[in-house]
Every structure is written in C-alpha cells, then in structure tokens.
Amino acid sequence: MRETPRSEPPRPRPDRAETHTTGASCSGTPHRSDGRPPHTPRGARQPGPPGRPGTTPPVPGRPALLSAFAVLAVITWQVLVHGPLARLDERVSGALVDAVPRRLSELASDLGNMTVALPVLAAAMAYALWRGRRGDALRAGLAMAAVPLLVVPLKEWTARPGPLEPWAEGYFPSGHTATAMVAYFGAAYLVSRRLVPVAAVLTAVTGTGLVLRGYHWPLDVLASLFLGFLILGVSSTCRRRSSG
C-alpha cells in the first residue's frame, strides 16, 4: 500500500509584497507604508481660513437648497388654493392657540421682533468688523436685508388671514420667524460656531410662541423656516466661494 505524501505548508514567495505589516493595530488590519493619505473624504482635512483652526462650516449643497425651495413652493401653493394641507393647518392651530399662558407665548414671540433680533445681529457684525472680517459682516447684513424683500411680496401675494384676525390679511409667511432665524444664526456664524445650537433654540422658541399665541398659523412659521434656510444657504455659498 502506497503512503500518501504529506503536503508541506506553503512558503512565502520572495517576489510578492506583504499586504500586512506588524505595525498594524490588530491581525488582518491593512496598513499603508507609503505615507499617502487614504482615498476617502475624511483622509485629508482641509485647513480653515487663515487664523481660524479646523475646517470651514458645512455649507448646504444645491440639492438641499432645491429641496427647501420645493417644500416652500408646495406650502405656498397649498395656502393659495386652500388645499388639504392648509385646512389641516387651521385645525392644528385651533388646538394649539392659548395652550400656554398668553404672557409666556408673547414673550417667546417677541424674540422675533426687529427691536430684539436686529441689535443682536448688529453687535455680532461689529465684532466681525473688529476682527477684520468685513466680508462676513457684509454678507450677514445683506442676508438680513433680504428677509423683508422676500417676505413682504409673499404676504401680499398670498393674502392669508390670521388665526385670530380673519378680517386681516398678510400673515403668510411669518416675518418674525424669518427675522429671528436669519439674525440669530447670522450672529452665531459671526461670533462662534458653538452658538449655533443657541440660535436654533431661539428660532424654535420664536416660532412656537407665534403659533401658541395665535399670531400665525403653523404653516406660516414652517414656510419661514425654509425661507430662512434658503437665505442662509445662499449666504454661506457666497462665503465659501469668496474664500475659495
């Protein structure tokens, strides 16, 4: 009976490069030895503008801006034709108005007053000018100036009556919400990115107060949020192109 020969373990071939090195953190982990950055978006972080650590803030891309514009257009259309979304909006508003004490909702909605929001933005613009960031301060001021230029024609076009004043017109979209959003987010970008959550809270409180007090329908506030997003997005895009 012939004995089957035992197979010997394969020997490494000298002409083949090793795919793993002992420098890897664990067995089987790929390790690059040529020092080149990996071909991934996170492989190499681009430095921020001179004098500022980190990277530039995220800028809404074209798809995000187009989506925001599409949502704003649908809401506006529903308000104009008094469609199902607008009728649902009125029922929701009836259940929310005066759900909290009026004094509380009035204080919240006052955050969108120009006498409150504009001084905050003006102080942030002055700080930016002091730091030599004239372009950023100018763009923040232009973004704020765009709010009435866009809100007023929309109010006249839609002529939507108010929740508590059906005889009046011009409630869509909410100018207070757009003012708060552009002013507080603009101030946060000018002073410190860490203040962005604070700007988001102030904007949300403003819009909530307007709905609970009955100054605006929920869709008025929602449309202004998308409008403010468009204004801030265009401003951020201009900032990125000017610094690029």
Image (cartoon, grey):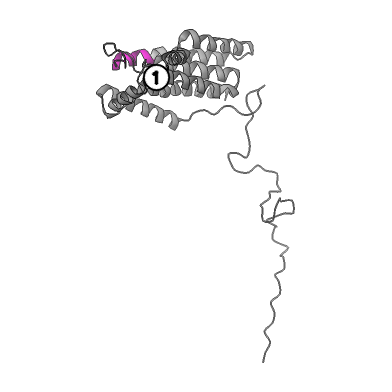
Give me the residue at 32% from left, 25% from top. 89
In this orientation, does residue 77 appear?
no
Q: In the depicted view, which residue is nearer to us: 229 or 109?
A: 109
In this view, which residue lies farthest toward the top?
Answer: 115
Front residue of this view, candidates 14 and 32: 32
Q: Please state the horizontal and vertical placement of residue 222, each as a whole percent of the image.
A: 39, 24
Most distant residue in the bottom direction: 1
Q: Is residue 180 placed above or below 26 in the rendered structure?
A: above
**Which of the 4 image quadrants contains residue 53?**
top right
Q: Is residue 161 magenta?
A: yes
> Is 10 or 101 nearer to us in this picture?
101
Q: Position of residue 166 (x, y in %)?
A: 27, 14
Residue 167 lies in quadrant: top left
The amino acid on which the numbered mark 1 sits, given as a three-letter code, is Leu
**Chief SS of the magenta region:** helix
Q: Residue at x 57, y 13 (%)?
A: 124
Q: Secondary structure at mark 1?
A: helix
**Left or right placement of residue 13 versus residue 120 in this view:** right
State the residue at coordinates (68%, 48%): 32
In the picture of the structure, the residue carrying the numbered disc 1 is 212
- Kindly tell me whether residue 205 is visible in this rendering: yes
- Number of callouts in the render? 1
In magenta, the rendered stretch is 150-163
Q: Is residue 10 above or below residue 85?
A: below
The quarter in which the N terminus is drawn is bottom right
